[in-house]
Amino acid sequence: MSSIIPAPIARQPWGMLIPLLVLTGFGGLVLFSAAGGSLQPFALSHWIRFGVFLVMASVLAMFPRDLARFAAYPVYGIILLLLLAVEVMGTLGGGSQRWLELGFMRLQPSELMKPAIVLVLAHFYASLPTGMINGWRALLPACGLVAAPMALVLMQPDLGTSLAIAFGAGVVMFLAGLPLKWFIGGGAVAAAAIPLAYFFGLKPYQQQRVTTFLDPESDPLGTGYHITQSKIAIGSGGLFGKGFNEGSQSHLNYLPEPHTDFVFATMAEEWGLMGGIFVLAAFGAILGWGLKVARNAEDRFDRLLAAGMTATIFFYVSINLLMVMGLAPVVGIPLPFMSHGGSSMMTNMICIGSLLMVHRWNRKKRGSGLSD
């Protein structure tokens, strides 16, 4: 086969790219149905955005390691300035101030910070001497790098994105080798601070989301409406679903946000349990490939970068699925490659591009022209 298929095509990681292409294509079909059987306004723009960002990811994959490491702090600093700009001149939407109007697009800088925090921490720990990993110099500067964007994002307010930033950062710090007792202590402090955070740190609508998550049936037509309708949509799909473009919950407008946060519920109603298994298998293939890239990396920076980017995608997937099934509060986290939205698509494709970049570094080190 190597004599038939050109080498540049054969060495691509098709074990990840095929599930990614199929998942995005399937997501477009779900968005087609969410729009009542029309390519506009969701499906067509979803596919176009994916095509554009796939080209961007391919370009990102060609970056050399030295350039990626050199860009870590400048990229982090630029995005931090953009977050400050959101506080000064950001656009309001849905009660939150999260976007910058650039004329040709609406940019959400907090989304860019998710991969940026992984990049800057991977560079920080790769540059840190091994003997210093147990000291305060390994912890305090990293905490500062994480706390600054988290504070700005929480001011917008955007609890889901701030948690995503913390999760990606936490994975990198854990894999960098920080003492386990620090994570245990941090977890204990966070658990003790939950009541204070609930009463003094969360907005009233965020408090309602938490209480609704604990007992959605207490107000099924009010604060519990989203989760209740999502559960109905998923449960009514049964084993094989109601059929493509036959979902009553989304078509009759019972299901809120059927094209963004609750796109999985839209899919499950029409494609059933089998559709859900297909989606999980596709994500499993993508995430499994990302972990394989991290394991194959010989350089510390490469390994932390790949693992952090994989963890960022995993956070999106896990929180969204838990949210639509009523197992986590509604925090506005879209489902990667299926939900309609340019910012989330851009973030996840940056993660994919970064993984492709590390994959190319790994292959170059091995001197092999074959893909994993």
Image: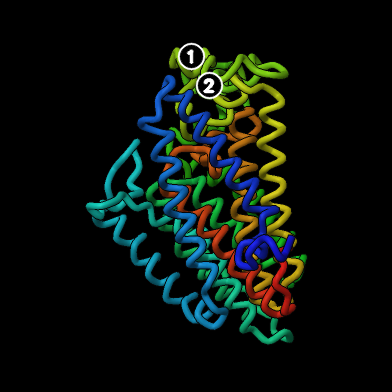
Which residue is located at x 64 percent, y 57 percent?
A: 310
Q: Nearer the viewer, residue 178 or 175?
A: 175
Q: Is residue 267 left or right of residue 135?
A: left
Callout 2 crowding tier (Cα within 10 Å): few <14, some 14–19, many ≥20: many
Q: Residue at x 58, y 77 (%)?
A: 123
Above or below residue 70? Residue 95 is above
- Give me the disc on residue 134: none
Whether tag 1 and tag 2 are in contact, CB under 8 A, the answer is: yes
Where residue 372 appears, as percent x and y from the top left, is: 74, 63
Inspect the image, locate mark 2, and give the three-letter code of the amino acid beneath it. Answer: Gly
| Residue at 64% over, 56% down | 311
Q: Quadrant of residue 4?
A: bottom right
Q: Is residue 15 above or below residue 280?
A: below
Q: Quadrant of residue 175?
A: bottom right
Count of labels shown? 2
Give how far apart the Cα atoms at labels 1 and 2 are. 6 Å
Seen in the picture, residue 364 relative to 158 is either above or below; the reply is below
Q: Residue at x 42, y 20 (%)?
A: 36
Residue 182 in view: no
**Mark carried by residue 221:** 1
* Residue 119, percent from left and from top: 55, 69
Which residue is more in the foreground, 223 or 165? 165
Q: Position of residue 62 (x, y in %)?
A: 53, 72
Image position of 218 (left or right of 250):
right
- Amino acid at circle 1: Leu
SS category of the residue bearing label 1? loop
Q: Position of residue 269 (x, y in %)?
A: 60, 20
Is residue 356 among what the camera can see? yes
Residue named by callout 2: 224
Task: Tell me the crowding category of disc 1: few under 14, some 14 to 19, or many 20 or more residues within 10 angstroms, Cα based.
Answer: few
